[in-house]
Image (cartoon, grey):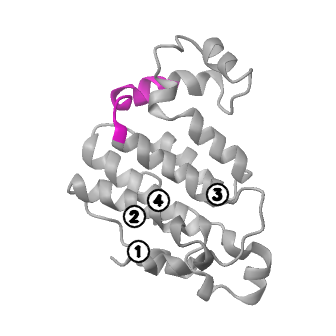
Amino acid sequence: MNIEDFNDFPIRARAAYAIMCCERYVAAVYPKLDFRRAASVMWQITDGSDYIDSALYRLVDIYPSYICSDEYENYEAFRNVGGGYTRITEDEFVFFKQLLYPCKDDAALESIMRMIYEIPMHFEGCTIEPLTKYPDLLNDLREINDILEQHQIELPDYSILAPYAVSNMSKDEFKRFDWWGMFIQPHGLSIYIA
């Protein structure tokens, strides 16, 4: 894989690739973990179902080391740490704390999830110039690939995201979405969401 191929991929396509990598990691390392709801939270970053900042903050709320911290015995303690501001409900807190507890000390998974957050957060609230002006932005994808390779997990086929590349967008699509890219649904890309 040539990481420079991602220069033509907008932010949402890069985030989608990172999510695909995260799903592969979880499926390989935690094969019995039903990761569908966590994957659904991640795909909200790309699918347009929520504002990007809201979707990103929901992802932060389910970082395993954060939600599973012994510091948060209950939802009230969890909610109060952020000044009463969280994007997940009490039922979701209980569900994700239980679901992700086996992963709470997994530094690799935590890194992948943080990079999923970082990819769009670099530009949240901004108009983006061509991403080729920011070659360091590929470092997150490079790190994610390294993590999967270290764990001998096959990388996803990024070519299935080619339809979302900037060079494949019409002028009208680019005018509407610019370097954020078109909305990307998880169907056909996610191993957890049919």
Question: Could you tell me the amino acid type at mark 3?
Answer: His
Q: Which mark is residue 122?
A: 3
Q: Which mark is residue 3?
A: 1
Mark 1 falls on what kind of element? helix
Residue 171 colored in magenta in the image = no
Q: Is residue 38 left or right of residue 56?
A: left
CA gap between label 2 and label 3 equals 16 Å
Q: Nearer the viewer, residue 167 or 97?
A: 167
- Tell which circle, 2 or 3, labels the residue nearer the N-terminal end: 3
CA gap between label 4 and label 1 equals 10 Å
Q: Residues within 10 Å of mark 2 (few under 14, many from 20)?
A: some
Residue 20 on image: x %, y %: 43, 59
CA gap between label 2 and label 1 equals 7 Å
Residue 124 on image: x %, y %: 72, 56
Question: Could you tell me the amino acid type at mark 4?
Answer: Asp
Q: Residues within 10 Å of mark 3 (few under 14, many from 20)?
A: few
Mark 2 falls on what kind of element? helix
Q: Residue at x 46, y 59 (%)?
A: 140
Does any portion of residue 3 appear in the rendered image? yes
Q: Main secondary structure of the magenta part?
A: helix
Does any portion of residue 186 appear in the rendered image? no
Q: Look at the image and give the residue range highlighted in magenta.
A: 95-107
Residue that numbered label 4 is attached to: 140
Q: Are marks 4 and 2 in contact (CB under 8 Å)?
A: yes
Question: Could you tell me the amino acid type at mark 1?
Answer: Ile
Residue that numbered label 2 is attached to: 142
